[in-house]
Amino acid sequence: MTSGCDVLYIGGYTPDTGGTGAGLTAVRVEADGALKALAETAAPGPSFLASHPRLPVLYAALECEEGGVAAYSADPEGPALLADGASGGSYPCHLAVDPTGTWLAVANYGDGTVAIFRLGSSGLFQGRPKLFPNRGHGPDPARQAEPHAHQAVFGPGDVLHVTDLGTDEVRRYRVGAEPAPHPDGPVRLAPGSGPRHMVFHADRWYVAGELDGTIAVYDASWRELGRTRASDTTGANLVSHIAISGDGRHLYVANRGPDTLSVFAVTETGGEGTGLARVAEVGSGGLWPRHFALAGDRMYVANQRSDAVTAFALRDGVPVPTGEGFEVGSPSCVLVPPARAGREG
C-alpha cells in the first residue's frame, strides 16, 4: 500500500481550549505505513488546518472565544509561527485558502462571522480582514439560536461558499478583486438540517447535515435532488466531515455517535435522485471521528475522544484498518499538505 504522502499535520484541542493536545503536530508516514512523531509546535487550540496551494505555509484556526488565526512554516522538523492575529469573530472552527493563494477565509462558529483575509506574496496576512456577520436562527433552540458559520469552500468560479449551521444556509461571497456578498444571496436549506461540511464534485454539491444526520445532494444551481441518511445505525448521529475520493467514485462521511465511516458509490453525475449508493459502513477505529484526510489509497481519521489518529487502507474504496495509529491529544483535523516540486522529505 502507498500512502500518497510522507508527512501529516495534526491539529486539535489543547488544555486551554477544553482538550489534551499539545498544539500542532507533524507526523511522518514511514514506508511501511507506520506513523512517527516528528515535531510539536505549541498553539492554542488549532482545531482546523489548511495549506497554501503553492507556498510552504500552513494556517490554523485557533478555536477560542476571542478567536485567533495563525500562519506557520510547513516544516515537518518543527513548524514555526510566522504570523498570528484575531480571526474576526469568536470560536473559529474552519478556514480555507482559494486556489490562487490570494484569499484566506475563516468561519467563526461562535458568532457566525465570516472573515476574508488577503494574502501577500509570502502567504502572510495583508491588512485587516473583511468581515461578514450574519443574522437569523433555525428551529433547534439549543443549536440554532444564532448564526454558526462552520465551513468555508472556494469554488466553483470566484465564489466562496460558507455553511451556516445556525441558520440552515449556505452563504455566498464573490472574491474577485474585492470580497463582497453574492448578488443572489444565500442558499436556503432544509430547516433544522444544520449544514456542517460540504463538497462539490461533477456539478453537484453534497452537504452533510449535522443536526438531521443526512447527506443532501444539490445540482450546480442548488436545486435539491434528494437526501439520504448518512448512517444506517440507530440513535443520534452528529455527522462531521464529508469528502470525495480522488477518482470521484466514492463519497465518505464520518458519523459521530455511531462512530463509523460511511461509504457511498457515486453512481451518476446528472438527473434526478441523490446518485449515491451505500457501499459500506465501518467502525472509525475510535470515538468521535471529527475529521479525516484522504491520501492516495489511505485514510487518516481524527478520533477526537480516543486521543488518536487511526490509519485505514482503501480497498475497492472501502476503509480497512491497517493496525497503524498515532496517539495525540484531542485531534480534530488531519492535514495532508499539497505535493510541491522539489519538496524534501
Image: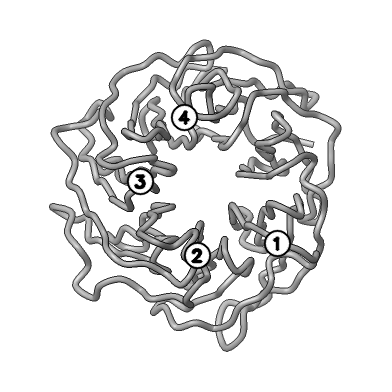
First of labels 1, 4 by sequence position: 4
Classify residue 211 by image quadrant. bottom right
Classify residue 26 by image quadrant. top right
Can you give x and y, in whole percent of width and height, for residue 57 in the image? 38, 26
Q: Identify the residue shown where x is 64% and y is 40%.
A: 295
Q: Pointer 2: what residue?
A: 194
Specify the label residue 236 is tagged with: 1
Specify the label residue 108 is tagged with: 3
Q: Are marks 2 and 3 in contact (CB under 8 Å)?
A: no
Nearest-to-viewer mark from 1 and 4 = 1
Q: Pointer 4: what residue?
A: 46
First of labels 2, 3 by sequence position: 3
Mark 3–mark 1 Cα distance, whole angstroms, equals 25 Å
Q: Quadrant of the C terminus?
A: top right
Mark 4–mark 2 Cα distance, whole angstroms, equals 23 Å
First of labels 3, 4 by sequence position: 4
Can you give x and y, in whole percent of width and height, for residue 277 in the image? 73, 74
Mark 1–mark 2 Cα distance, whole angstroms, equals 14 Å
Query: Given the image, on which type of amino acid does mark 2 rest?
Result: Gly
State whether residue 161 is above or below residue 267: above
Query: Given the image, on which type of amino acid does mark 4 rest?
Result: Pro
Mark 2–mark 3 Cα distance, whole angstroms, equals 15 Å
Most extreme residue toward the front is: 141
Q: Secondary structure at mark 3?
A: strand
Q: Identify the residue shown where x is 65% and y is 61%.
A: 251
Q: Secondary structure at mark 1?
A: loop
Nearest-to-viewer mark from 3 and 1 = 1
First of labels 1, 2 by sequence position: 2
